[in-house]
Image (cartoon, rainbow, N blue to C red):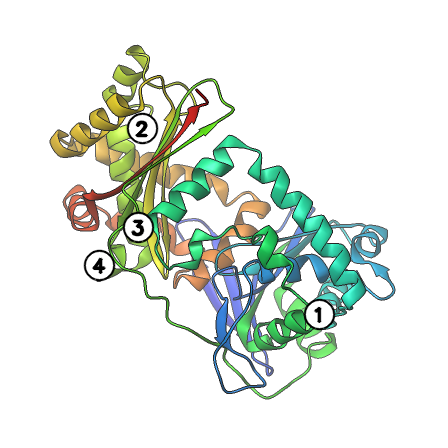
Amino acid sequence: MKKQYYKEIDETLYETKLDNGLQLFIIPKAGFQKTYVTMTTKYGSLHTDFIPAEGNDMINTPAGVAHFLEHKMFEKEAGDMFNVFSEQGASVNAFTSYDRTSYLFTAVDHVEENIKLLIEMVQKPYFSETSVQKEIGIIAEEIKMYQEQPNYRLYYQTLQAMYQNHPVRQDIAGTLNSINEITAETLYTCYHTFYRPENMVMFVVGNVEPAAIAEFISEKQMIKNQPVYQPVTDDIREPKEVKERFVSTPTDITRPKLMLGIKSDCHLQNRPLIQTEFEMMFILELLLGEQSDFYHELLADGLIDDSFGYSFILEPTFSHMLIAGATPDPEILKQRIIERFETAEFDESAFRRLVKQTTGEYIASFNSLEYIANQFTRYYFNGAILFDIVQVLQQINLRDALTTFHQAVDMTNMTDSRLVPRG
């Protein structure tokens, strides 16, 4: 088992690959009561087109299957797995994102028993047409509930106006039409293609002994060896240009909402995604952050309130920037933001303070088992180790960050998306 000590944060990471291909990471945290365990497959809402494990041709599956499958993994012929974990003193949950589905539990004791239970749950699917039809109704209500929320509507209206082909346009949960196309056969096809040891990562963090827990997982767990198959997904072809430059929808709100969406070309940068992500976020913070003079000017002019914010999303197949908030005058706010991007000057000392502050926050976050467990696999799938972040931050400088920002952001390739009051 490989052992890596990170001196800057006083953490040790143990890594091994089991005979069946499952990648296992363990971080011992002496003195912590809880233990966090995650089991994650590299399968998310973007993986709609792929060659199935038992086939030769590319197939297309309905939007929302990965999320639907996550729900169904908790339902077994013998009953609900939430109750079984609860009886063993564990709290269990799961989530689906664009590129992965993760199952996790936290427990104070009976860790090995709950690990075995987690593996059994993930490795023993049970789908019937009756239960699938029941789940369609449940997820349909979930989708309807979200669609009634203005912020949700604005977000997906923006993505659908920005992207022409990319499946990021679709809600992770799918649509009311797409989930009605899902069958038990669909679920089994997706399961057998993506829920394979060589396509999964298991992560354990807590007061555990690494060698003992690794031996338990490798020798006593239920994952069986099977022919190796690495899922083959279709290439996503997305034009650089946005689909629509302007979209506005009347809705039942009292104040207009604006969201500016800008596609970026960050994947053209010859550097790790995690470094690019930080560089972009630092420049955005200097431009629009709450500590900037510009933010307080907008606030004083009544153009924004505390709903104003921004984000930068960088994933292996797409990246974009979003700036949003409620405002009495969307057009003026938009023009002020564009002007800010074009004329802003940057202070080296302010940049260094921001990097130093962020570094401190990340080091402090390593005391949270929840943070480590939820973030480790995301960074791993994006080609980085969570504990390498401190070293990455130490290498970042303002000049390189500005180069990345200017090369990635084209303000002429922007979607102006609005919700406005009816009438």
Disc 2 and disc 3: Cα gap in Å? Answer: 28 Å
Q: Amino acid at mark 4?
A: Gln
Of the pair 221 and 232, the residue shown nearer to us: 232
Q: Considering the numbered disc 1 on the image, is that residue within a helix, a strand or a loop?
A: helix
Q: Earlier in the sequence, mark 1 or mark 4?
A: 1
Q: Amino acid at mark 2?
A: Gly
Disc 1 and disc 3: Cα gap in Å? Answer: 35 Å
Q: Considering the numbered disc 2 on the image, is that residue within a helix, a strand or a loop?
A: loop
Residue 18 percent location from the top left of the image: 59, 78
Q: From the viewer's perspective, is residue 190 above or below residue 392?
A: below
Q: Kindly report which numbered mark, 1 or 4, lies closer to the viewer in this rendering.
A: 1
* Residue behind mark 3: 243
* Residue behind mark 2: 289
Q: Which mark is residue 269?
A: 4
* Residue 245 shows up from this direction: yes
Q: Could you tell whether 410 is left or right of 163 in the image?
A: left
Pointer 1: residues within 10 angstroms few (<14), some, or many (20+)?
some
Of the pair 257 and 290, the residue shown nearer to us: 257
Q: Earlier in the sequence, mark 1 or mark 3?
A: 1
* Residue behind mark 1: 184
Q: Amino acid at mark 3?
A: Lys
Which residue is found at the position 58% from the left and 76% from the top? 193
Residue 80 percent location from the top left of the image: 82, 57
Q: Considering the numbered disc 4 on the image, is that residue within a helix, a strand or a loop?
A: loop
Pointer 4: residues within 10 angstroms few (<14), some, or many (20+)?
few
Pointer 3: residues within 10 angstroms few (<14), some, or many (20+)?
some
Q: Considering the numbered disc 3 on the image, is that residue within a helix, a strand or a loop?
A: loop
Which residue is found at the position 51% from the left and 50% from the top? 171
Disc 2 and disc 1: Cα gap in Å? Answer: 47 Å
Q: From the viewer's perspective, is residue 255 above or below residue 277?
A: above
